[in-house]
Image (cartoon, coloured by chain):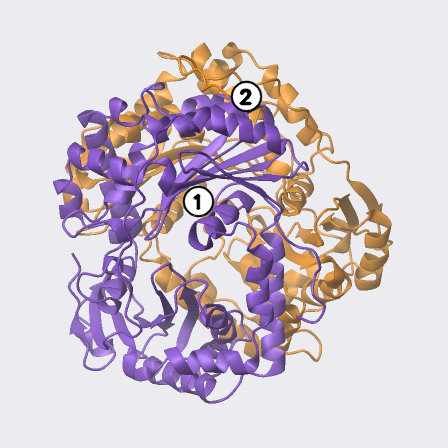
Chain colours: A orange, B purple
Amino acid sequence: MSPVDRSRLPVPGPDPDFTFPAADTHHLRNGLSLRTVERRGLPMVSLALVLPAGSGLDPEDRPGLASLTADMLDEGSGDRSAIEMQEALARIGAELDTETGPDSVVLALSLLDRFVPSGLQLLSDIAVRPRLGAADFERVRTLRSNRIRQLRDVPGVNAEAVFARALYGTHPYGHLSIGSSASLAGMDTGDVTGFHRVRYDPSRATLIAAGAIDGAAFARQAEDAFGSWRRPAGDAMPPAVPADHSNGGVAGAAPAQRLLIVDRPGAAQTELCIGHAGVPRQTPDFHALVLLNAVLGGHFSSRLNLNLRERKGYTYGVRSAFDFRRAAGPFSVRTSVQTDATADAVAQVLGELRDIGQGRPANEDERSLSMATLTKGYPRNFETAGQVARGLAQLATHELPDDTFNMFVPRLRALTADEVTRAAGQYLHPDRAVVVAVGDGARIRGALETLGLGEAAIVAADL
Amino acid sequence: MPVPTPGLDIPFRKHVLDNGLQVVIHEDHSCPIVAVNVWYHVGSKNEVPGRTGFAHLFEHLMFEGSAHHDAGYFEPLQQAGGTLNGSTNSDRTNYWEVVPASALELALWMESDRMGFLLPALTEAKFNNQRDVVLNERRQNYENRPYGMAGLAMLDALFPDGHPYRWATIGSPDDLQAATADDVRAFFRRYYHPANASLAIAGDVDADGALELAAACFGEIPAGEPPAAVPATPARAVPARRMIEDRVELPRLYLGWLSPPMYAGGDAELDLLADVLATGKASRLYRALVYERRIATDVSAYQGSRELGSSFQIVTTAVPGIGLGALEDAIHEEVARVRASEVSPDELARTLALTETAFVSRLQTVGGFGGKSDQLNNYNVFLGDPGYFSRDMARYRSATGASVRAAADAHLDAAHCVTLSVVPAGRHDLAAPRSEPAVIT
């Protein structure tokens, strides 16, 4: 065969079709929602139990309670000690993945199909009948306290904690899901059992299976394992964080001080977190914001990375993101930069946030590149059973309609350049963005204070 | 494993082009995507003292343009809906794209252009920019990260002077500063050519058509000389006791032994033993150190398998008030037990069940790091057999209590253990006894 023509890049053929697999839906009598996507090929099933019991439900005086409760779930059940529980999981080749997000707790197991019935029984023991014993509580609390001690030295964690507090104050989004040493010390077993009793409610939970299992078989096995789960006595508590267009009580005003430095004398780099409160997942402008963020800082070829990494060499990488939550989650730009470039990096970031909304709106090339990145590659987001299960978990967490993934590409394609520019003007606020810098204060403070952000406040994350 | 899962493998076709490029193709039509994955059999083990970090710095330049596409590599592939990345370790450098099936030719065109025609597009400006990026990568992932320099200190302690595993892939800042664009040219000519590479294509393609496209894109690149082999590794480390101070609250202990190379006898057994010792709360070390005695807050163990020789490492973090000497004694006690007597049948069965899940999980995705295309290249480059998946599983399935004990006994002798303590600044008292400050370049 003759060599390829190197005078031009090959032009790809038409895009493959994509349809998100239809999910089978079923409800147990106790209200538990079941979602199944059958996908044969490999003898594996991804299970996920989604509970609306995330950190957004932390009581104001108990930051970290949702995550502590989730962490206690696999510390034994009935006659089975914590160790025996782990042995039982290992015997079926499973490792429990517990994720406490702002809006939900997701308990996930990836299993060979022959182990699904045992996996569901174990998952039920873990979620529905955990021991939550006092001795286990003390041990887990000590481990978490030691974990927090380790996190105190991680620059990115400090930046995130200070940023969240500056944006949200005492709102539950204002602290890390793990809480702090002080809040941990103030909690007891009763807090955990109380939170579990009230918030772990089958009528608000969703159990998902994706992989080598059909909906009818899954419903039978789920009934066996979860059918006896009863709703908490009394009226169910409303979700603390409504899934709607409102901001969920999040303040939009700029905090009094916008430039916050966590001093790390002699640090090798400066960790930066720049941004402000964003919008909820249910915003009608979701797709415009996804496209806007892609042009701005969502991928390698976005403006921010081309500027700070590929032109200036200040950093290994920089990304921006709208963290879409039930209430208005943060919009942030995150990066680590070399110390002597700290102030210029901040100036560049703020400049990019400003330009995309007015001086230098997204041009056709940028828009088409970001559009292609988001749409043409979309099918690979659902290649594995685990990815499909996570997709269904998102629908449950945010109460989104089933056609969400099928509509993603057409909704993006319908966007005009003007809508992206309009979204930038409406949702990016460089004039009130908070700048958190974790680095060598003596070497970065002076230059940062010349940027017109006011005087720097030297703060601690208080983890 | 109680009930072995039958018929798990990665079916493939292999063809060697006239210029020596090995092409391995696997069809999987479950998702309309295709993965292109190229391995060059070069890594930091091929570097020379004074130019450490070079293989990785070079990898960065592979994304900055080639003769017929003298611009960034991300844009055209992203425009086609693809994703791409690359990585360097001690033994190999890999580059991959996952693209819609209709963009296979584009991905092959671009991979072949940088394999055959990189140097005309190389400029001092690109080189200097990516060197700055890599220096920032080092600051971010090593210098500014708690315990971030420990891995480098362990390599320095485990391997003898002159051995290429003695330095880390990220390299030293002085060496990176000393590198020149001429070094790039020499390195490219020596290591980046068809005879030192393997191309895997996996996904929604027709094998015949994919092979034709591969031949059209890569066939014209001239063959090169296969590079000379690098030195082998001693079987045992010279014991050393080192210490570094870091910006941390809790001290951490690292224990390391030299162990058999990847895929050699004992490698799978030590991998299983690492699970028995420290994966999950029911593992021996977690149970002893964290759950019962409560002298540690975390513990992990792994067999770090590499081409020339591996290392088996155990890492644990002390709780407040506990010195690392106590952890060292407790770990050696547990290691002595697995050297003296077999792990229980239940422990072995649990570990094998976890391993089986991990193997089957690896078949779920065609591309990216660890996907099927990456595995085909791994097996092809290190063993000359892309179809090794099922035999790889068999290595684990055939392990027994006796073979695990024998591997532990042969390789985890306390007399050949290397110890590193990472302590808060000024707290030498928390280090394992008789530790000497480590020198990290």
Can residue A293 be seen in this snapshot? Answer: no
Residue in the image at 55% along x and 11% along y:
A416
Q: Residue at x 56, y 63 (%)?
A: A71
Q: Is residue A442 left or right of residue B87?
A: left
Asked where in the image residue A374 lies, by quadrant, the reply is: top right
The residue nearer to you, when weighing A166 against B272, is B272
Q: Residue furthest front?
A: B18
Q: Amino acid at mark 1?
A: Gly
Residue at mark 1 shares a chain with residue at mark 2: yes
Is residue A197 left or right of A318 when viewed as pictured? Answer: right
Subunit bearing disc 1: A
Instruction: Using a 10 Å C-alpha cutoff, classify the residue at mark 2 as few (fewer than 14 neighbours), some (14 to 19) or many (20 or more).
Output: many
To which quarter of the image does residue B207 belong? top right
Residue A404 in picture, x, y percent from top left: 68, 30
| Chain ID of residue with mark 2 | A
**Badge 2 amino acid:** Ala
Say left or right for B197 vs B11. Answer: left
